[in-house]
Image: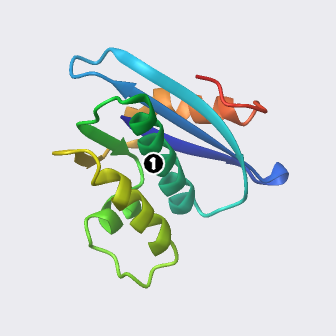
Amino acid sequence: MCVDAAIDSSRSKIGIGVIIRNSIGQVLAAVSKPAVGNFKSQEMEAKAMFFGLSWAKQLHIPIDYVETDCLMLVNALNGRISQNSGFHDLVSDVSFHLSSFSNVCLSHIKRDADQAAHSLAKQALQLDNDCT
């Protein structure tokens, strides 16, 4: 699973993009989800991951890999950032969902490696409802 988020701060709108692939790279599911808000980038990425993991659980799709281009989120989930950080509650929620998937591997990827999820997030900024 790869997640990303985008923002249109002038409209206080967030776009969430999630793409779930199998072990050979075939797309199993994808979603563009619009949301309301104006958050820091790491908070948006955490919200995107939270939604993606919740959605995968709801669809009963096993997740082996979770990828994001947000290094701060990966570090926080791996316990490398103080628990006093501003988005600790979001990180706790994401950790709870991650624990539902056995042997899940969390990875930081470069921005250009998540173009599909990024495109879905940008598309969501133009939507009123989820598009799966």
Classify 66 as above or below 30.
Answer: below
The residue pinned by badge 1 equals 49
Q: Dot 1, crowdedness within 10 Å: few (<14), some or many (≥20)?
A: many
Q: Is residue 116 above or below residue 34?
A: above
The three-letter code of the residue at mark 1 reads Met
Quarter of the image holding residue 29?
top left
Q: Is residue 54 left or right of residue 119?
A: left
Scheme of colours in the image: rainbow
Report the residue that reaches farthest toward the right: 11
Q: Residue furthest left?
A: 103
Where residue 76 sits: x, y (%)? 34, 68
Q: Is residue 28 above or below residue 92?
A: above
The residue positioned 50% from the left and 42% from the top of the image is 4
Count of labels in the image: 1
Seen at 79% across and 33% down, the residue is 128
Write down the quadrant of residue 80 in the picture.
bottom left
Q: Camera-side residue: 73 or 102? A: 102
Q: Quadrant of the N terminus?
A: top left
Please, what secondary structure does the residue beneath circle 1 have?
Answer: helix
Query: Is any part of residue 114 visible from this angle?
Result: yes
Can residue 71 be seen from the camera position used here? Answer: no
Q: Quadrant of the C terminus?
A: top right
* Residue 93 in the figure: left or right of residue 39: left
Expressed as whole percent of the image width and height from the top left, the position of residue 15 reads: 65, 41
Across and down, in percent, residue 33 comes to 63, 36
Q: Position of residue 34 (x, y in %)?
A: 69, 39
Q: Is residue 50 left or right of residue 24?
A: right
Q: Please name the residue shown 75% across and 30% down the image.
A: 127
Of residue 103 and residue 106, the one placed in the foreground of this image is: 103
